Image (cartoon, rainbow, N blue to C red):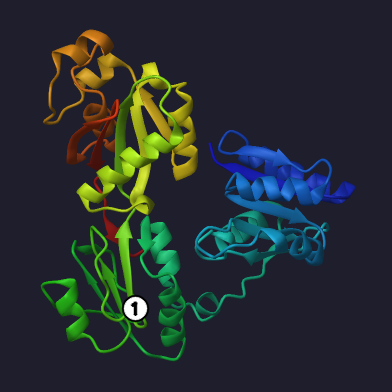
């Protein structure tokens, strides 16, 4: 469960905090500030909170979060509300972290007015980073996001090319680029361009071309007891290289329920910042898909395949293996791709 963090400092602020906690409990794990604001805030950043809400002066929030800022791709959403509940202001990660949307939601909850200042939102223009986040796409070259936005704000349209069909109505600020490959799309479009591919590819001109690829791959894993985080990371790294994907594309880690308390796997999921799901042998046996079967594994675990079936189980309907079982050093890995799509609202 994702974390929603709240810092309030007065009686009125505590009342607003209570409204937020009541509305979000059950959907999010709630963390309320008690003492040592700087220490508490650092822990929220470390835990990758979905949103940190400060109810009080914006200056307090700015000074508190300043030591922990890294980049727009990883920083959490930070929102400030005044204690009278009149305004809600996103001050960090408005797009990639979703702070703008949190501000609108919380303003509705408090009966307040959201104050949105990001340029594309003020002008009601397409925002590449919001589009990426909502479609679970990873920017291969994040700095280009700003350049795409700057072009749109200047009235320059951006081209878009995708390996899969784009759903919904394309914004007026974009136009489709007709090409067979991402490389030929770059050649066909001389201006700003967004390219969507299943796997990362070498962008020729990162100054104007924004590459996006899906966070849609599940790693299924099995291991002997006591495997260290480093050993597991090494095995996953080798598997990713063989599959042609990168760590940022991993959306989940899966195994058999016999491993649900395995320290190394829990540490690995935390390091990858992805959920760790385990499944019983009966569930894995019923998971459809072409897997490599092992009588020895079935005798020990109750299922003929752990890593492959676990990956397919977490990938869900429409998922399929993109990397069969890789074994070595007492660790088995497999990768499955979830069914994914890309569209406009």
Residue lying at the far top in this picture: please name it.
Answer: 299
Q: Position of residue 49 (x, y in %)?
A: 60, 47
Q: Position of residue 150 (x, y in %)?
A: 46, 85
Q: Is 207 located above or below residue 199 in the figure?
A: below
Q: Image quarter for residue 219?
A: top left
Name the residue rendered at 29%, 33% in the picture.
220
Q: Residues within 10 Å of mark 1 (few under 14, many from 20)?
A: some
Q: Is residue 333 left or right of residue 266?
A: left
In this view, the residue in front, 304 or 126, is 304
- Residue name at image x 38 percent, y 70 percent: 141
From what the image shows, is residue 84 above or below residue 189?
above
Q: Quadrant of residue 181?
A: bottom left
The image shows residue 105 at horizontal and vertical percentages of: 60, 55
Q: How many marks?
A: 1
Q: Residue drawn at (44%, 72%), measured in percent from left and top? A: 127
Is residue 121 shown left or right of residue 319? right
| Residue at position x 25%, y 89% in the image | 190
Question: Looking at this view, is 42 or 94 the one in front?
Answer: 42
Farthest residue, direction right: 11
Q: For this rendering, which residue is in front, 213 or 304?
A: 304
Question: In this picture, is 216 found above or below 291?
Answer: below
Q: Is residue 279 visible?
A: yes
Q: Is residue 137 left or right of residue 303?
A: right
User: Foreground: 324 or 154?
Assistant: 324
Q: Which residue is mark 1?
A: 206
Q: Secondary structure at mark 1?
A: loop
Q: Is residue 16 visible?
A: no
Q: Above or below — where is 96 with respect to 249?
A: below
């Amino acid at each position: 469960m994702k974390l929603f963090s709240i810092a309030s400092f007065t009686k009125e602020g505590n009342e607003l905090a209570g409204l937020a906690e009541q509305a979000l409990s059950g959907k999010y794990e709630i963390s309320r500030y008690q003492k040592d604001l700087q220490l508490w805030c650092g822990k929220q950043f470390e835990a990758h909170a979905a949103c940190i809400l400060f109810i009080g002066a914006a200056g307090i929030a700015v000074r508190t979060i300043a030591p922990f800022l890294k980049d727009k791709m990883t920083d959490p959403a930070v929102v400030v509300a005044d204690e009278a509940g009149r305004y809600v202001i996103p001050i960090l990660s408005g797009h990639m972290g979703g702070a703008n949307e949190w501000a609108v939601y919380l303003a509705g909850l408090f009966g307040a007015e959201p104050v949105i200042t990001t340029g594309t939102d003020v002008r009601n223009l397409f925002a590449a980073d919001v589009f990426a986040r909502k479609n679970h796409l990873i920017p291969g070259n994040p700095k280009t996001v700003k350049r795409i936005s700057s072009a749109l704000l200047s009235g320059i349209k951006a081209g878009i090319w995708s390996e899969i069909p784009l759903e919904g109505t394309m914004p007026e600020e974009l136009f489709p680029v007709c090409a067979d490959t991402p490389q030929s799309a770059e050649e066909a479009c001389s201006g700003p361009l967004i390219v969507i591919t299943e796997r990362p590819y070498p962008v020729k001109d990162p100054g104007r071309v924004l590459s996006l690829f899906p966070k849609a791959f599940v790693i299924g894993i099995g291991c002997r007891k006591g495997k260290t985080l480093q050993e597991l990371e090494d095995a996953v790294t080798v598997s990713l290289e063989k599959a042609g994907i990168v760590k940022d594309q991993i959306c989940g880690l899966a195994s058999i329920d016999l491993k649900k308390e395995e320290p190394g796997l829990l540490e690995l999921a935390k390091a990858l910042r992805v959920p760790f799901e385990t499944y019983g042998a009966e569930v894995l046996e019923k998971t459809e898909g072409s897997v490599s079967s092992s009588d020895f594994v079935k005798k020990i675990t109750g299922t003929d395949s752990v890593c492959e079936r676990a990956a397919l189980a977490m990938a869900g309907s429409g998922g399929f293996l993109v990397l069969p079982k890789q074994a070595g050093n007492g660790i088995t890995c497999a990768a499955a791709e979830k069914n994914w799509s890309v569209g406009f609202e």
